[in-house]
Image: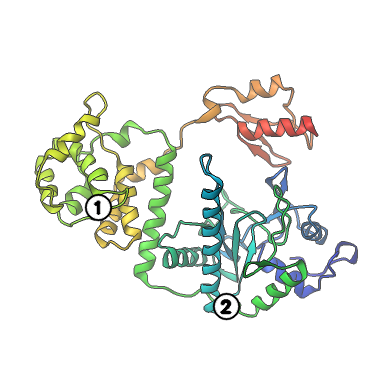
């Protein structure tokens, strides 16, 4: 860990206490870190030096740090409040997202500060915010789950914003964890400072570090919360990963086929009333699947209709019009997304159903499957592309790139340049323009 700053590498005249304050909120182990090159973070397997830290603060280098101290404990936890701009967003749409992200960040910061936790809020360097919590040496799983609990308590969704650490622990196959851009830098793209916020005002470097030092005085243990909340958050977290994968993966025959037995329909939806509102309507999400399932399970369809007060079977029969080539459909992802939405809003019957779905062997089988090749990798060879552009060697070390042609992936083992076809094309353009 960096403690002293060489005068030649100490633009801001930082004391040992200043350095400790900065690193306590931004990095765990310092024998590796991420350096942003052309806006992309690459893992450096070497010691973070005082010169590196100084350059980060000055703005000539942008560094990312892992929260992990060892395989099980972390130096800090954090939440990233991004405002993602979609392609069809108007300026007004985007500004609403910015305001919501910043308000959520402020609300989280005030809540955690009220519990006397060692917490700060800083700009992300763009329109977003970070909330950082120094919990020096705390269990990574406990920190991650507590931050998700805060999001669940304040906003009803433990996955509304990105939480660090992302893992409960590290291992030989996953030795580093995920990086979070260190505070007090200049954003690699927007060139804005990522300093500490005081309300709506951004502080300068020196005042930012003063706030960090004051916040360290409140360093303490991870607060506890109820087992019931823990179980709910765990279920929502698990289902979020499923829905994310389901929405990005190609639909597979095994996931769309009618199951021989659906524990959700047989044990929950036939016994408990479930809500129907918003875009996650019971009639749209559940009836459509019952239309298919009921073909081979007519008794279940009757029991479901009675439990959900569906007096007519016409609603089920009408869904046949939407089947492809008259073949019954059954979409697990639609059911899970419906149950997850209503579980977030406190419906206990939906939560029961969600737990049933996540215990299904079909769910476990799907989560073990690797995502299919998508995008450019389906239509072009990265190897031929590299040869045509005469770009088969790393521009930094001149070693040969390692290519995975089937998935359109490139990697330089020594420099940690890696990514897909889109990043590879951007790397070529940057090299040619530079």
Locate the N terminus and report the quarter of the image it occupies: bottom right
Residue 340, how many percent across, how many down?
A: 34, 53
In this view, the residue in front, 434 or 419, is 434
Q: Secondary structure at mark 2?
A: loop
- Mark 2 or mark 1: whose residue is earlier in sequence: 2
Locate the C terminus and report the quarter of the image it occupies: top right
In this view, the residue in front, 310 or 398, is 310
* Residue, disc 2: 220
Between the C-alphas of marks 2 and 1, the distance is 43 Å
Q: Secondary structure at mark 1?
A: loop
Give the image quarter of residue 27. Answer: bottom right
* Residue, disc 1: 276
Residue 171, how many percent across, how many down?
A: 56, 54
Front position among marks 2 and 1: 1
Residue 280, how many percent across, how many down?
A: 31, 49
Give the image quarter of residue 64. Answer: bottom right
């Amino acid at each position: 860990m960096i403690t002293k700053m060489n005068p030649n590498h100490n633009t801001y005249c930082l004391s040992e206490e200043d350095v400790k304050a900065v690193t306590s909120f931004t990095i765990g182990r310092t024998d590796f870190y991420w350096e942003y090159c052309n806006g992309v973070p690459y893992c450096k397997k070497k010691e973070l030096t005082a010169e590196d830290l100084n350059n980060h603060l000055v703005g000539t280098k942008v560094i990312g740090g892992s929260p992990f101290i060892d395989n099980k404990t972390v130096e800090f936890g954090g939440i990233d409040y991004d405002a993602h701009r979609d392609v069809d967003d108007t300026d007004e749409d985007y500004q609403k997202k910015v305001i919501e992200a910043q308000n959520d960040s402020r609300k989280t910061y005030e809540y955690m500060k009220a519990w006397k936790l060692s917490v700060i809020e800083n700009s992300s360097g763009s329109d977003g915010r970070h909330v950082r919590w120094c919990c020096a040496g705390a269990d990574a799983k406990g920190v991650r789950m507590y931050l998700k609990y805060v999001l669940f308590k304040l906003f009803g969704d433990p996955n509304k914003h990105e939480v660090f650490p992302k893992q409960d622990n590290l291992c030989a196959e996953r030795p580093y964890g995920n990086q979070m851009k260190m505070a007090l830098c200049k954003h690699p793209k927007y060139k804005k400072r990522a300093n500490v916020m005081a309300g709506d005002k951004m502080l300068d470097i020196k005042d930012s570090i003063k706030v960090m030092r004051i916040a360290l005085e409140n360093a303490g243990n991870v607060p506890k919360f109820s087992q019931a909340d823990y179980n709910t958050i765990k279920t929502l977290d698990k289902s979020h990963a499923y829905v994310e994968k389901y929405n990005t993966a190609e639909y597979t025959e095994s996931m769309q086929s009618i199951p021989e037995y659906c524990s959700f329909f047989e044990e929950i939806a036939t016994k408990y009333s479930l809500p129907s509102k918003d875009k996650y309507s019971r009639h749209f999400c559940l009836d459509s699947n019952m239309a298919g399932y009921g073909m081979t399970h007519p008794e279940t369809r009757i029991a479901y209709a009675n439990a959900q007060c569906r007096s007519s079977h016409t609603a089920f029969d009408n869904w046949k019009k939407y089947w492809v080539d008259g073949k019954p459909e059954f979409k697990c992802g639609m059911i899970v997304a419906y149950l997850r939405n209503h579980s977030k809003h406190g419906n206990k019957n939906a939560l029961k159903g969600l737990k049933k779905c996540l215990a299904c062997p079909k769910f476990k089988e799907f989560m073990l499957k690797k995502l299919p090749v998508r995008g450019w990798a389906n239509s072009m060879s990265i190897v031929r592309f590299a040869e045509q552009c005469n770009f088969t060697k790393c521009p930094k070390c001149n070693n040969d790139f390692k290519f995975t042609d089937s998935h359109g992936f490139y990697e330089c083992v020594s420099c940690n340049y890696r990514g897909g076809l889109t990043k590879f094309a951007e790397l070529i353009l940057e090299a040619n323009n530079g």
